[in-house]
Image (cartoon, coloured by chain):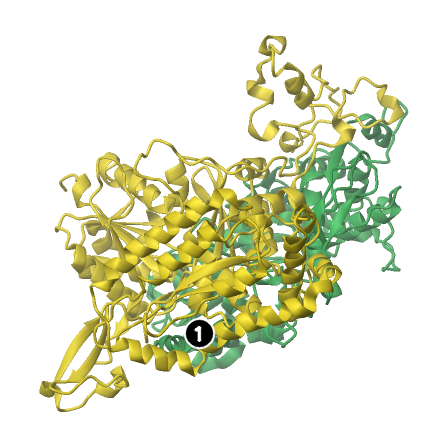
Chain colours: A yellow, B green
Amino acid sequence: MPPFKDEHILIIAPGSQTTLAQLGLPESFTPPTHRFPTRMFPAPDGKTFEPYKIRSRKKLVTADGDVEMAGADGKPEEEEEEFIELPDDDEGAIYPLKEGRIVNMPAFFALLNHIFVTLSPTLHTPVMLIAQPAWTAKNHEDITQFIFEKFKTPALCIMDSALATSYAYGIANATVIDVGFEKVDVTAITDFQISGRGCVPHSGGEGMTRNLVELLKSKDLTRDMAEQLKKSPICEILPAGTPLPGTGEAAEEVVSNPAAAASTGATASGPNVKITDAHGESGQHHGAGEEDGDGEGEEKIVDEDGNLDIASIVTSGKTQEFLAKLEKEKKAAQRKANKDAKEAAEAAAAAAKPIRLPNSKRPRVVFHYEEIIQDEPNPKRQKTPESAPTTTAEETAAPAVENPEDDSNQQKTTQKEERRIKRDIEIGVERFQAAENGYMDAIADAVYRTVLSVDDIAKRQDAWESLILCGSGSKVRGFKDALVNILNNRYLVSPSSATMFMSELPSNLATPSGTGSMTPNASVSSTPNQPPTANAVNPLLLAATTATNPTLNPSASMTSYTGNQAHSSHSQSPTSIKFASPPSYFPEWKSYEEAMFLGSQVAAKVIFVVDQGLSKGFLSRVEFNEEGPAAIHQVGLVY
Amino acid sequence: MASQPLSSSVQPTDVYGGDEVSAIILDPGYSSVRAGFAGEDTPKSFLNSYYGVGADKKLVFGDDAIHNPLAGLEIRNPMAKDGTTEDWDTATQLWEYAITSRLTSFKQADPRTNGLNDDLKDEKDVDAEMEGVQEGEKPLEEHPLLMTETAWNSTKNREKSIEIAMESWGCPAFWLARNSVLAAFGAGKATALVIDMGASTASVMCVHDGLILKKSVQKSPLAGNWLSSQIRSLFSAADPKVDLVPHYMIASKTPVDAGAPAQAVYRKFDNPPTPSFRALEEERVLTEFKESVVQVWAGPGRLNSPTQAGSTNLDFVRSQPGRVFEFPDGANRMWGVERFTASEGLFDASAALPIPSEETPVQKSQTIPEMIKASISAVDVDLRAALLQNIVVTGGSSLLNGFNDRLNNELITMYPGARIKIHAAGLTAERRFGSWIGGSILGSLGTFHQMWISRKEYEEFGVSIIEKRCK
């Protein structure tokens, strides 16, 4: 078999929403060249799948919006129909992956095929497929069989996505927390092997969006709007225990301006009162809201007036009528203009920031929502150019003093004449609560549980010290800090005062004597009659006192101060919790949410090019022919 | 089973001969279910035996689902205290989950998976599900199944096993093996004295040529869960009393001095989780305590027995450094001699701490040395030497610090002059999954393929075939 070349390697990394793919390894590893939405559409024949929505319409007849795929099925007058592809439409889509699991294998195969055809690799192309942790052994076999038989590939490697992430970071012991679309996978890795898995179902990025929709029910926030809100910089996850703005401290801070103080207090109480059930657990904001409730009456009217405006137009039937009118007048040229306008708005917003309070201190913030309107026969993204400048003008004009009237004015809605689809919605403290109601707790518990399921107790501390957060869901502002905060608050084991000092006290007093000599991890076959060794000083204490002056500690911190031995009186973990720092030697990689893809390139290089199969990193075609799909379990980097 | 190998000439014609499809090994226990493919070194699927019953009577399986502090989530276990199956309906679902979640694909017809998708029932999901339904109905149609059972399993239970495998799961072939025998196989022995320290039951028995010697079977409840209750007794007797607060109750904790009362912020629950949920979560803390603090006095002698110097071993232990354990609420203290006393009852009935909920104190015959003695003396004298040279220790609770040293010391005292050799796997996983690994080895042997009870045989003879074939 000729050696594989860099430019031939095909990498496919499926996710529940987006599948990343790339043909060839560049000189310096880059983010994926191709992104495919992980969805397929039933083809008109009802059996196969198509990558885009296909809608049939009768020739010479204007397309009827209601014609459905199924309806087109089996009708004899086919020559009169023509099929059109709607690349941006996702109605009726089939998502082959759900929470990482493969729920529709034929559709998944069709997706793989589509990717393969799009990238059209050579016959010498080995395939590196990144597997989701939830895939079963049978899934692996089926995929192996499909890829070999369909693509005639000479070699296949299936690699676990968490493992790929640890390859990207180059860390042998790590805990990978992958915040996906609807799930959070937690994988503990020791020595580049998977040694513990956990999963939080019904969470991920979508879980946060759902929380937002639930919280902002009173504002008639649709899922799309919540999604945009989640991605916007105003949505943040505050570390547990941080008082929400408008309650407690935050109100005190702005007390210099009486008007503003009143407004913050009252506005904060508004939404709190409205959605009490969602706040059931978080008693603190609730109470604070009631305290500030003096000016509530008049404030609320203004508030609700503003809300009614939006509510009625955004989601009521009127919106539909109104959108229908718009549809008739769509022009492609607007798209670019929109983009410019949006950028301008963002730039202006960024420029306006410094004079404002930090987001986390502001009880209310105006959220700019842009709706994308689908045109039935010829879908184009539609945003309004005119709205942005006016908004930015208001933005900059809106001073640090948050005037409630300003706010209500800002709640401009669409104007028919100008075809405004952009809306400004005032969002209160709900934007900080996307990860409440036990969302973060469940993730933290999964992390704890997963690390504790590592068999090798000595390795657990290492896994705690290199947490890796990845997955697009973790892009939400403050996610990482909030997670670290909760892990530290709840699970961190502190050095006990019982072992802080040396064991020079008379031992017959039954005084606890924490010595470094009894390392619990290594004491499986303890010989108790052995006297305590000379090194009766807590190594942590020794290390701490000699840290600044290494010469004082000739026995070298190498032995006693590395990794999990930090304070050895504990065999409990974690004694410290840290996030691993991402590698800095990949200039093309700016953010590491998709580090998994970087790792897959590293692994592909090692497995296909450097190693050439010596250590059975991949399944070759010959092996597949001899042993069948089950041979995939003997190779590769899955378990 | 290995006692009656069939030569190729007398091989029945209706045996299952699927060489290329690997068998699935299912090893259910009181605390966990292990499942995986034959020929692999660890089970791919490791599932908590405890399951949750939601407020809406929906069952949830697996660690990912049962640790959420939801109101009304009841935690139950389908296994009886002696490690046999009690609640067959749930056990079947639990095992099915163990197999389908990691080994074979999820089948859409499964009510559980449908339940998972309930909250997002839009049309596209329904579409996807409808397609899956047509694929297949039974989860194990392709794979022969090797299941394990305890040595004291009832005939009724055994017949139920094959019925489920054949009727509900559609297995092409089935075999039922004793878990102790498999543990011996896992250690590479056909003849051995097997000491299995499980969660609910500790057992000792003699295995000769792959067959259990029935009279030698000894079991007692002095195992992992009993040790947990010993630790609870220890906590309530400790001064100051230790409150066992599981992690889910804590919002954040603050470091406090050793022995000082905890200063933690507790989470508030409008609808507090059920007591069974709390018990499950407390057990997690106790597991950590066992892993990092508890130790078995390694010997020589017992913890209370005097040493040559005139003092007792207990005094010696007191002079040894203790270990600190920090509880979820931040309270921490040094555990000195207590960490030995908790486990001493496994070997010395008089040292067992009283458990408030149980009236009858630990019987001497329940301790491990006594069980070994009883087991050995129940077998032929000629066999004893061979058994003592092949002692296989398996089960998660045998991972207690110092357990094997103590066992060795006890055996030397009991059988002076005999050659004693203990085989205990060094790797944690091999010890915990001992019987599964034995099953994996057995299931991948070429000669074992003649042994399977095929579907045809089952259809011809019915459930009673299990008593005839699996001895």
The picture quadrant where one finds residue A74 is: bottom left
Residue B378 location in percent, x, y?
71, 54
| Residue at (72, 55) in percent of width and height | B267
Tally the marks.
1
| Residue at (47, 52) in percent of width and height | A397
Q: Nearer the viewer, residue B195 or A366?
A: A366
In the rendered image, the residue lying farthest to the bottom is A76
Element at label 1: helix
User: Subunit of mark 1?
Assistant: A
**Residue B209 makes an appearance in the image:** no
| Residue at (53, 71) in percent of width and height | A307
Check the picture and name the quadrant holding the C terminus of chain B. Answer: bottom right
Residue B305 location in percent, x, y?
86, 34
For residue B465, side relative to residue A541 (left or right): left
The picture quadrant where one finds residue A171 is: top left
Above-or-below relation of B470 to A168: below
Above-or-below relation of A59 to A126: below
The residue beneath circle 1 is A314
Residue A340 location in percent, x, y?
28, 54
Above-or-below relation of A511 to A393: above
Q: Nearer the viewer, residue B1 or A34?
A: A34
The picture quadrant where one finds residue A531 is: top right
Label 1, residues with CA under 10 Å away: few <14, some 14-19, many ≥20: many
In the rendered image, the residue lying farthest to the top is A551
In the rendered image, the residue lying farthest to the left is A79
Q: Nearer the viewer, residue A484 or A377?
A: A377
**Residue B397 makes an appearance in the image:** yes
The amino acid beneath tag 1 is Val
Q: Nearer the viewer, residue B220 or A103?
A: A103
For residue B464, side relative to residue B172 (left or right): right
